[in-house]
Amino acid sequence: MGRMRVLLSGSGGYVGSVARGVLEAAGHAVVGLDARLYEGCDLAPLTPPPAPELPIDLRDVQLADLEGIDAVVHLGALSNDPIGELDENLTYAINHVASVRLAELAKEAGAMRFVFASSCSMYGASAGSGLVDETAALAPLTAYAASKVRSEESLAQLASDDFSPTFLRFATAYGVSPRLRLDIVLNNLVGSAVASGEVRLQSDGMAWRPLIHVEDMAKACLAVLEAPREAIHGEAFNTGSPDANYLVRDLAEIVAEVVAGAQVSYAEGAGTDPRSYQVDFSKIMSALPSFRCEWDARKGAASLASAYRAASMDEAMFAGDRFTRLARLRTLLAEGRLDGDLRWQEQAPAFTAA
């Protein structure tokens, strides 16, 4: 399609702060949209993500904000299972209703493509049924996962000759980003190892998780933007690598090998995590030959450990609210900076380096 003007929602988030650079390096013009809920939640004074041109709540987007946009990469959301349980109505309002409204406005404004960040968590507990492909029954176990199911169903109805929604069902993210998260499994295990010398498992480690590096997530978005329309129109793609389905306990062992001296430990009373699924990624391998994951868990764990050490991560940093999304929101709520609808009670903060 050539050079595009791309609206990137969630541009200041964990994935968005990486995706922007990938899209711009490929020659596309990016307009960032972000509510700045996690401003300052950075690992170190790395190169900061550019401030969004649209520092507004996803729920407040207007048609004029989409003027001149050729495509949307929609990453903005309440971004994991624990936040989803904070208020299911908010999860529905932001992750589903606001997402569909954004797509409707994009279509009205003349955008041609809408790349939706979906999730393999929609498959729920399916580890006993082998690899699940895109035709598998969806069995979401959380409000977050259910919001992705609803969004896919609604967005699919907007497909037309001039508007192509595509659903990237991402595996579990990991990897270094300027806007770090520790509330995802591999990032958390490496952080625990570096900060304490223990690779702390909160479950028995027997759940299956497919993983994808944050840089590979960004490259998948780029691949969809640049693919022929017939390859991506209205399609859902499990997005990850065929060799990246891991038992959580095996991830812990990888981390213990990468972080010298670290030992695997289990939380008292650690039980079974019901979210367990192994995913088939053959469809995206076939449909988008330009997309291949370049990272694996061992390489990613080593990169994370190096970044954590450079930032002098200790127990206090690891346990603080800076890198855990739900904890950060609760801090902002307790301080009265956000109201119960997660709207700013003051002007959204300008960018400040970590």
Image (cartoon, rainbow, N blue to C red):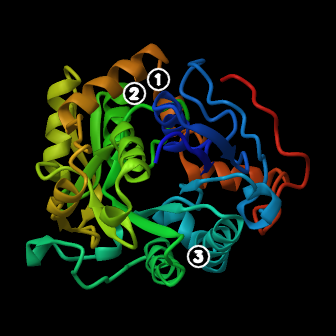
In the depicted view, which residue is nearer to us: 323 or 108?
108
Helix, strand or loop under label 2: helix
Q: Quadrant of residue 216?
A: top left
Query: Which residue is painted at 75% across and 26% down in the image?
Result: 352
Sequence-first disc among 1 and 3: 3
Q: Residues within 10 Å of mark 3 (few under 14, many from 20)?
A: many
Query: Which residue is painted at 67% across and 54% down in the image?
Result: 329
Q: Quadrant of residue 341?
A: bottom right
Helix, strand or loop under label 1: loop
x, y percent for residue 289: 20, 48
The answer to whether marks 1 and 2 mark residues whose Cβ atoms lie closer than 8 Å is: yes
Residue 221 left/right relative to 66: left
Amino acid type, residue under disc 2 in the picture:
Ala
Amino acid type, residue under disc 3 in the picture:
His
Q: Nearer the viewer, mark 2 or mark 3?
A: 3
Instruction: State the residue position of label 1.
Output: 313
Instruction: State the residue position of label 2.
Output: 195
Instruction: State the residue position of label 3.
Output: 96
- Which residue appears farthest toward the top when viewing the image? 310
The answer to whether marks 1 and 3 mark residues whose Cβ atoms lie closer than 8 Å is: no
Q: In this rendering, is residue 295 above or below 154?
A: above
